[in-house]
Amino acid sequence: MKRRLQMLPETIQLQKDQIKFLKQEVNTLCYRLTNLVDEIASKSEDLNQDLIQATTTVFPAYDAARTASIDLLAAAIEASLIKLSLTKARSERALYNHNPGQKRNKEGRNVAQAITTAFGVLEKDEKDAKIEISSLDRQLEGYETLLNLVDGGKGGYQQIINDWTKVKQETDECLKDLRRLGWTGD
């Protein structure tokens, strides 16, 4: 016990020295951390400025191309909807042979005459549809040319146009097949 008491001042001094050393080490680490935080903040500001500069110089060109592509697609969809509505009205008129203001003589009409009349009207409408399809194909080629000028043919909007064109062509083919099989559109 006596020996411990004699060593107590030395032990206290050792503990003080160790605390002093650890305190200096903590201060050094705090200084390094503060410097790192300052360095990160300055680099963050530089990177933020670089990002702002990059977005202001790069994105307007892409935005203009994207806006043109969106406008083109919207116009194509709108035109298709109008043409679809017109085709529906034509098919209803051809199917029911409805001509407002024209009196029909019911005595001389029979099923064979109605089928013959409907078939003639459908053939005429099919010819008109083929003409319209070729016109739409020419318009789509023009749209694709415009899209290639705007987007370079490499963007996602080109894929949308290609898919839409394919769906439109397959829909037209299906409608033709359905008409041949006697589908009336109801």
Image (cartoon, rainbow, N blue to C red):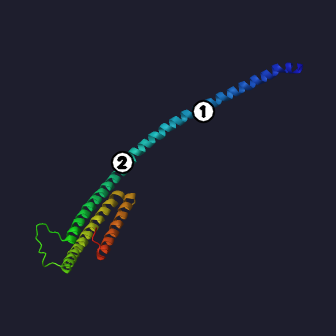
State the residue position of label 1. Answer: 33
- The image position of residue 32, as x and y in percent, is 61, 32
Residue 155 visible? The answer is no
Location of the N terminus (image quadrant) = top right
Give the residue at mark 2.
Answer: 60
Query: What's the CA distance linking mark 1 and mark 2?
Result: 40 Å
Q: Earlier in the sequence, mark 1 or mark 2?
A: 1
Pick whichever, 158 or 77, lies toward us.
77
Q: Amino acid at mark 2?
A: Pro
Q: Which mark is residue 102?
A: none
Q: Is residue 185 left or right of residue 155?
A: left
Q: Is residue 144 left or right of residue 102?
A: right
In the picture, the quarter occupied by the C terminus is bottom left
Answer yes or no: is residue 17 visible.
yes
Q: Nearer the viewer, residue 86 or 16?
A: 86
Q: Position of residue 59 (x, y in %)?
A: 38, 48
Q: Position of residue 156 (x, y in %)?
A: 40, 58
